[in-house]
Amino acid sequence: VKGRGKNDFQLFTPQMQQEFERKVMIEKQLQTALVNEEIELFYQPIMDLKTNEIVGMESLIRWNNKVLGQVPPDEFISIAEETGVIIPIGHWVLNTAIEQHARWQKTTNQPIYVSINVSVRQLLDPTFLEKLKNAIENNLLDPSQIVLEITESIAMYAESMSEKLAELKKLGISLSMDDFGTGYSSLSYLTKYPLDSLKIDKSFVINMHRNDENKAIIQTITAIAKEFDLKVIAEGVEGQEAHHFLKEIGCDYAQGYHFSPPVPASEFQERWL
Ligand code: C2E
Ligand code: CA
Ligand code: CA
Ligand code: CA
């Protein structure tokens, strides 16, 4: 940390100290989050912009801890990845989302897909494929209704990833590139990885009306998706304006507060199924 004067250096500002303590606390509390049943999945509908009907849902993790309260996933997922606890948590997410989806398939006639966020750390776990296979088989689920959302960070493991993803695809599931356009990687993975869809990052969609560059980026990503024969999903659709624009340019699917925030399973069932 830069000091105020020439010889005035501080290793730890009070703010850094606070952040550090919070991180340590999160690490500690995360260890018992699963057994204490503090973790839950919310679901958010994904809409078809042509028919205005629901086509799928994304599962989104929620953590309510007795000491820390509600901790947002953007804060704890990266910590869970660092410590490795993302492996059991990710396994729980996979099973819970697939079980829930299977139950809804049996009790409703709504043929919607479930989209599950998967961290790189999970993909690198040598037992991941087996776990996914078991979850699908145990629930007698049609794998074509399962989408795994991965991020551009997988490009750092380019060599082993292509094979891994190809094996996953053999199970019959679909792969979606999340947060598209925010990573550092080149576009070469569009030909290297067996993707089915791209998700336009919400930062572009939310700030669409603020500058034309975001609109241009959204249009470009949509065009890239078409070119590569991929579906394109926009997240962060908060209002009618974005909804119209996306529909106009031929974006396939949309997700956002405009349709619904992520909600608990019971609420999702009531409202959408
Ligand atoms: P993400 O996968 O990009 O998920 C989209 C985020 O946008 C979610 O935040 C969602 O609640 C939020 N969102 C949806 N619609 C809107 C909107 O109209 N406006 C705005 N401003 N936001 C909207 P959330 O639930 O806080 O999750 C944050 C991130 O945490 C996710 O980003 C994902 O990277 C990660 N995450 C969530 N659940 C899981 C999980 O089960 N496993 C893993 N590995 N990561 C997860
Ligand atoms: Ca996602
Ligand atoms: Ca995203
Ligand atoms: Ca994100």
Image: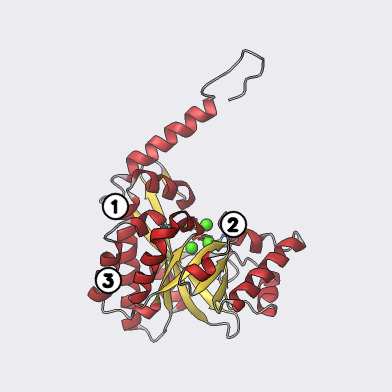
Which quarter of the rendered picture does the C terminus lie within? bottom left
Say which residue label 3 marks.
Answer: 133
Q: Hey, which quadrant is residue 187 in on the image?
A: bottom right
Frontmost of labels 1 and 3 is: 3
Amino acid carrying label 1: it is Leu
Dot 3 lies on which element? Answer: helix
Q: Of 96 and 7, which appears nearest the observer?
A: 7
User: Image quarter for residue 165?
Assistant: bottom left
Which residue is identified by label 2? 182
Residue at x 28% of width, y 74% of height? 136
Name the side, left or right, on which 237 lies relative to 139.
right
Residue 256 found in image quarter: bottom right
| Left or right: where 260 falls relative to 100 | right
Q: CA distance from mark 1 to mark 2?
A: 31 Å
**Percent position of residue 110, x then y:** 42, 84
| Marks 1 and 2, the one that precedes in the sequence | 1
Please state if 90 lies on the left or on the right of 150 as rendered: left
Q: In the rendered view, would you say 268 is above or below 155?
A: below
Identify the residue position indicated by label 1 in the image.
Answer: 34
User: Quick check: can you spot residue 118?
Assistant: no
**Is tag 1's residue or tag 3's residue first in the polypeptide sequence?**
1
The location of residue 86, given as percent across then percent down, is 35, 52
Q: From the top left corner, tell me how far across and down residue 271 is, in percent.
A: 47, 75
